[in-house]
Amino acid sequence: MPESLWEGVRRRDRRALARLISRAARGQEIDTIRQLGPPQKPARVIAITGSGGVGKSSLIGKLIEPLRQRGRTVAILACDPESPLTGGALLGDRFRMGAALDDGVYIRSLAACSGRQAIADHLDAVIRLCEEYGFDWIIVETVGAGQGDTAVRAWADLVVLLLQPETGDELQWEKAGVLEVADLIVIHKADLPGADRAAQQVRAALELAGGTIVPVILVSSRTGKGIAELLDALESLPSKSRRGDDVHAFLNEAQQELHRRLRDPAATSLLALWRSGRIDIHEALRRLWELTGSPQP
Ligand SMILES: Nc1nc2c(ncn2[C@@H]2O[C@H](COP(=O)(O)OP(=O)(O)O)[C@@H](O)[C@H]2O)c(=O)[nH]1
Ligand SMILES: [Mg+2]
């Protein structure tokens, strides 16, 4: 266990963060990261999804500067090894120069992190590392149109779906799961014709589906239209419980309860009993549950 890397992350050392992220993305340190338990300061984790070319990278690039102006630190995880964000291509010259000095922004591309479980697990760990470092916001650019890809729910507080006018995306809106997974829908490239109509169609589709009506916001990364409104919405929308489905939410809380009890001084001998095979896991859990646990340090 590279202890110094952990200390580095807590000291806000970029290189330590980068190295631990590389390890986590390869599936190393996953258990250690899991054992950290819930973060002291949870970040707001936002997934930006939408099909390729809809403008996810462009939009994220536009969010950085106003976010910094609002005093937020932000980590951006681009699930695209060739993301134009990492090269700084989408960040304005002025910002790019400032960014080198600004330790409130961290941009990192990762190999594809779609809905596949193993990779989503690693993404979870990478997010947790960024939380340990202390970022206020973590924005993840995900690949794919999110068709039925409810996996994002497992790690995102808010899911933003980008659609654009007139590209045949309309056909996909009806597909189960695409709109449902989103907490906020952006009609992107609102500088193009047809954006208003697209917004109307989406609103109609949402009403038809009958679920919660999510905000639909017109945004153009090219002109800046709607960026402030989008940020306001992202700041004010209530976080869905991360690990959104009931099973994950339950397991998450149960794990916290177990961690609390494991800090009880009596837990050590209990674990030794279990390790030696003298009690089985059911008996160990039963006894562990009776411990009060120590107060949070
Ligand atoms: N008209 C218009 N084009 C945009 C806008 N934002 C991005 N684009 C263009 O859309 C293309 C894809 O953008 P990109 O951010 O790479 O999309 P991604 O694949 O979803 O990350 C690029 O050619 C951008 O210049 C916008 O607000 N308006
Ligand atoms: Mg992109």
Image (tube, rainbow, N blue to C red):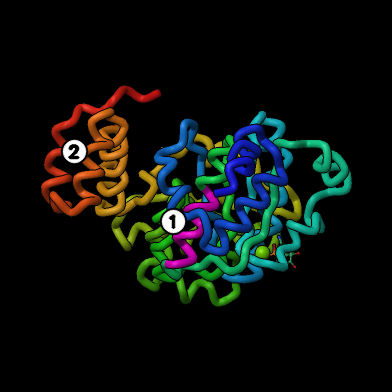
- Residue 20 left/right relative to 257: right
Task: Please tell me how many numbered marks the rendered image carries.
Answer: 2
- Residue 63 left/right relative to 138: right
Q: Magenta region, mostly helix, strand or loop?
A: helix
Q: Quadrant of residue 196?
A: bottom right
Image position, residue 64 (x, y; %): 70, 43
| Amino acid identity at mark 2 | Leu
Residue 150 forms part of the magenta stretch: no
Would you call the spot at circle 2 few (<14 residues within 10 Å), some (14-19), or many (20 or more)? some
Choose between 113 and 52: the one closer to the eye: 113
Name the disc covering residue 224, or none: none
Spatial CA span between label 1 and label 2 = 39 Å
The local secondary structure at tag 2 comes to helix
Would you call the spot at circle 1 few (<14 residues within 10 Å), some (14-19), or many (20 or more)? many
Q: Quadrant of residue 177?
A: bottom left
Q: Which residue is mark 1?
A: 182
Image position, residue 72 (x, y; %): 63, 33
| Amino acid identity at mark 1 | Ala
Task: Please identify the quadrant where the C terminus is shown.
Answer: top left
1 or 2: mark nearer the eye: 2
The residue sitting at 80% across, 42% down in the picture is 99
The local secondary structure at tag 1 comes to loop
Residue 120 forms part of the magenta stretch: yes
Rendering quadrant holding ligand 1: bottom right
Which span of residues is magenta-colored? 118-127
Q: Tell me, yes or no, if residue 197 can be seen here.
A: no
- Residue 139 left/right relative to 297: right
Q: Earlier in the sequence, mark 1 or mark 2?
A: 1
Image position, residue 108 (x, y; %): 68, 54
Q: Which residue is mark 2?
A: 288
Q: Quadrant of residue 220?
A: bottom right
